[in-house]
Structure formats: C-alpha cells, structure tokens
Image (cartoon, helix red, strand yellow):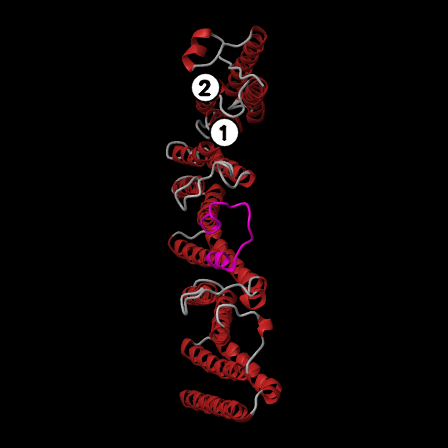
C-alpha cells in the first residue's frame, strides 16, 4: 500500500518529510476534515446549549460531535495512511485531543450547577481519551505505544486535582484496559524477533514496569480525589502489571530471551510461586495502611493461586520424583531448595503474618501448605541423598532408605506438634497427627515386609519411643490445662 499523508498542503508535507497527497485522496481527506469540523462545531454548540436544561439531549449532541470525527479520522488513516507509523495522521489526532478536552470544559461551564461533569462532558472527555489512543498508535512503534499508553493513565488522574468529573477516573481505567489488550495480543511488547535476549534490561522491563508504576500512581491520586471504583480498578491493574513484570522477566531470563516457547520448568514455576506469595504479603501490608476491598481480596487471591500452583505443579506435574528432572549437583542449594524449602518458608511466614489480618481459613490453608512443602523437601532430600542428582521414583528403594523415611516422618511429626503447641495452631497439630498416623501405617504395612534384621527392630523401637513420648507430652498438657482451669 502506498504511504499517503493527510496534510493538505505541499509545504506542510515537505516539513514532515512526506510526499503530498494525490489529488483524489486530497479531496477525500478535505471532505472528511470538513465533515468532522461540522459535527464538532454543531455537536458541542448544541451540547452546551442543552447542558443545563436537557442533559440527555446534550449528551446525544456531544456524542455525535465526538464519534463522527473519530470514525472519519480512523477510516482515512486505515485507507490512506501508514499503519505502522504516520505522523501526518497523528497530528490531527492530537488536535482532536485538545479540541475535545477544551470542548468538554466549555460544556461543563454551562451546566447547572457548573463543572459537574455530566454525560455530555463525559462524552467529550472520553472522546479525547480515544483520540489520544489513536494518536499514540499513529505516531509511535509498538513498544513506545505500550509504554506511553500506560504512562498516559496518569494524566486523567492528575486532572482530578482540579476537576472532580467522574469520567476522568474511567479514562484512566480505559488506558489500563488498552494496555492489557496490547500485551495480551503481543506479550513480547515489540515482537519476538525484535526482543533483546539481554536479561532484565530489555523491552519487557519498561513495557510492563512503566504501566505498573503509572497505574499505581493513578490509583494513589484517585484515592485522594474522586476515589470510587476507578481507584479500585487501577489498584488491581497496578498489582497485575507488577506481577507480570517480574514473571515475564523471569521467563525471559530462564528461556534464553525467548518467552513464547518452551515448557515451564520446576525452577521457573518455583519463582512464580514465590512471586505470588510475596505479592500476597505486599498487598496485605498496603491494605493495612490504605484499606481497599481490591487489596483485601487480591491478597487472598494471590495466596489461593499460590497454593493451587503448589498442589498441581510442585507436587504433581513438575515433581522431580515423577519427572526424574535433574535436581542439580550442589548438595544444599539445589532445585529442591528453590522449589520446596523456600516456598515452605514463604508460605509459613505469610501464614503467621495474616493470622489476625485475614480469615482463619486463609491462614490455616497457608500453614498447611507450608507444612506439606517442608515435608516434601525433607523427604525428597533424603531421596536425593541416597540416589544422587536424579531421584525418579522408578529407581527403587533400599532398606536403609526405607527406614530413614520412617524415622524422618516421625521426627517431622514431633516437630509439627511442638510448633503447633507453641504457636497455638490447631492446623499444625492436626497435620502432626496425620503425619504420625501415616508413619505408623508405613511401619506396620510396609516396613514389616521390606525391612530385615536390625532395621526392622529399630523401626518398631523408634515408633514405640515416639508414641510414648507423644502420650506423655499430651498428658502433661492436659494436666497443666486442668490446673489452669
């Protein structure tokens, strides 16, 4: 397609470094501009006239004054312009932004009472937002369009310092939706071929990070002016893009600069899980300082999502016991440390942090998943100690390894019982009882047939000693409780 420009004069076209339009195209462009001017003038004049007495009629006129120019400009750009980048059409789009914004202010001054920001004003300012979106698409490449569109959400939020028009907050939300649409269409921001393979310092950082910061600032500003649902939406958008920024950078780094191919590994999934748990803690902390239903439910959603990831992917889909994936050659700082111990610590810390800040079931869920992760880490570490780097289940069990699991599970059960009593956590005490019951069943149903000689005797002796100790421990607790009563 030939690249035409809508500047009707050769002088302006030469100033922009583009060729002048052909005669027929120039005529079409001038007719379109004339039609747009007529609708803007008539629509805004009538909207101002009826703004006080007939708000619905004023809104209708304002809508026509906005929709027709936008449709005309978009049609001309798609027909005659350069879809990738066209400053010739970006300039009229910028003029529409200024005209619609000024028109909305002009209409608002005629309202009764003035400067309320009714439907007619909303159409005018909403049209300015759409024109700004068109202008960015016309003037900039894919990466800069995404970054600047995210940053543009700041402008309507700042405008609420001087005007409390309800539409301003929703314009900011519209910018967030537009950015979300862009990254959904192209997660690489600039296209897979153009995305640098340099970790962190590539287009993903500004493409996701700048919108996250801009949306956060917009939410902060709206909270101090108009408040309401737009503020909640911007908080959610900011939190979402902050998580996306970290997640996309992690995937980019772990896949050699390619984010749209390759399966998710356990190490990568562990990082995503840690990010989600950390996000849940951050959202709780922010909610404590600036209460918000979005932050409250968003923090719990992050925790629930983390638990779902752990149950499905850490324990089943990507479990090295089932996949026989390499756990690394380093004895302690290996895949098991990253995928099980660190999430266990994070989930346990989050459970303690939210005990008095979130529902009891939420804290109990996190405590339980932390216990399961710690159990999995200890068990798989024993497996790695006996089998080495690859711990696939099909490599069999030795007698000493079998005995070690029984001793380990009993020890973990006692540790959970102690922690449950110290923290006054019923969940940990129940988890302790379940684990000890599993260990007892293993000793009687598995060890009896698999172990021989000294190991079988040690297994039963150890079990008996632990059960006696637990009985004495609970007897002491009951005695102390009776004395306290």
Residue at 51% in and 74% down: 387
Quarter of the figure with the N terminus: top right
10 Å crowding of disc 2: few (<14), some (14-19), many (20+): some
Nearer-the-camera pick, 26 or 317: 317
Give residue 443's position: percent from left, percent from top. 57, 86
Q: Which residues are magenta?
A: 251-271
Position in image of residue 333 (x %, y %): 40, 66
**Closer-to-camera residue (227/154):** 154
The residue beneath circle 1 is: 133
Q: Residues within 10 Å of mark 1 (few under 14, many from 20)?
A: many
Alpha carbon of mark 2 to alpha carbon of mark 1: how far? 13 Å
**Side of 418 relative to 36 (left or right):** left
Q: The C terminus appears in which quarter of the rendering?
A: bottom left
In front of the other: 133 or 137: 137
- In this rendering, is residue 452 above or below 11? below
Q: Quadrant of residue 61?
A: top right
Secondary structure category for the residue under label 1:
helix
Residue 26, percent across and down? 55, 9
Is 263 magenta? The answer is yes
- Which residue in the protein does label 2 denote? 91
Is the residue 108 above or below the residue 266 in the image? above
Front-lying residue, 317 or 221: 317
């Amino acid at each position: 397609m030939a690249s035409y420009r809508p500047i009707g004069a050769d002088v302006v076209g030469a100033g922009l470094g583009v060729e002048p339009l052909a005669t027929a195209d120039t005529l079409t462009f001038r007719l379109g501009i004339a039609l747009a001017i007529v609708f803007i003038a008539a629509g805004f004049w009538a909207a101002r006239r009826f703004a006080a007495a007939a708000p619905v009629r004023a809104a209708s006129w304002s809508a026509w004054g906005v929709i027709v120019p936008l449709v005309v400009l978009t049609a001309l750009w798609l027909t005659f312009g350069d879809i990738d980048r066209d400053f010739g059409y970006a300039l009229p789009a910028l003029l529409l932004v200024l005209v619609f914004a000024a028109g909305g202010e002009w209409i608002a001054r005629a309202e009764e009472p003035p400067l309320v920001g009714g439907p007619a004003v909303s159409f005018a300012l909403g049209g300015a937002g759409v024109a700004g979106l068109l202008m960015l698409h016309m003037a900039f490449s894919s990466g800069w369009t995404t970054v600047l569109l995210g940053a543009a959400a700041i402008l309507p939020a700042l405008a609420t310092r001087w005007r409390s028009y309800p539409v301003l907050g929703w314009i900011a939300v519209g910018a967030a939706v537009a950015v979300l649409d862009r990254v959904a269409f192209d997660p690489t921001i600039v296209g897979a071929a153009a995305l640098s393979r340099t970790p962190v310092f590539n287009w993903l950082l500004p493409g996701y990070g700048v919108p996250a910061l801009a949306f956060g600032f917009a939410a902060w500003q709206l909270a101090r002016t108009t408040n309401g649902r737009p503020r909640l939406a911007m908080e959610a958008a900011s939190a979402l893009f902050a998580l996306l920024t970290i997640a996309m950078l992690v995937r980019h780094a772990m896949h050699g600069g390619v984010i749209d191919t390759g399966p998710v590994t356990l190490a990568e999934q562990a990082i995503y899980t840690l990010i989600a748990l950390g996000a849940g803690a951050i959202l709780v902390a922010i909610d404590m300082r600036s209460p918000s239903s979005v932050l409250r439910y968003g923090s719990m959603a992050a925790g629930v999502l983390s638990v779902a990831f752990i149950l499905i992917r850490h324990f089943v889909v990507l479990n090295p016991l089932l996949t026989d994936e390499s756990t690394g050659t380093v004895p302690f700082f290996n895949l098991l440390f990253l995928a099980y111990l660190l999430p266990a610590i994070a989930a346990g810390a989050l459970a303690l942090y939210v005990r008095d800040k979130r529902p009891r079931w939420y804290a109990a869920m996190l405590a339980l998943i932390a216990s399961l992760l710690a159990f999995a880490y200890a068990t798989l570490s024993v497996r790695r100690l006996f089998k080495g780097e690859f711990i696939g289940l099909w490599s069999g069990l030795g007698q000493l390894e079998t005995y070690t699991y029984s001793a380990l599970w009993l020890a973990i059960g006692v540790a959970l019982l102690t922690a449950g009593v110290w923290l006054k956590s019923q969940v940990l005490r129940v988890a302790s009882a379940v684990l000890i019951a599993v260990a007892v069943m293993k000793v009687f149903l598995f060890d009896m047939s698999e172990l021989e000689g000294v190991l079988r005797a040690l297994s039963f002796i150890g079990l008996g000693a632990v059960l006696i100790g637990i009985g004495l421990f609970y007897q002491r607790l009951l005695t102390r409780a009776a004395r306290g009563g």
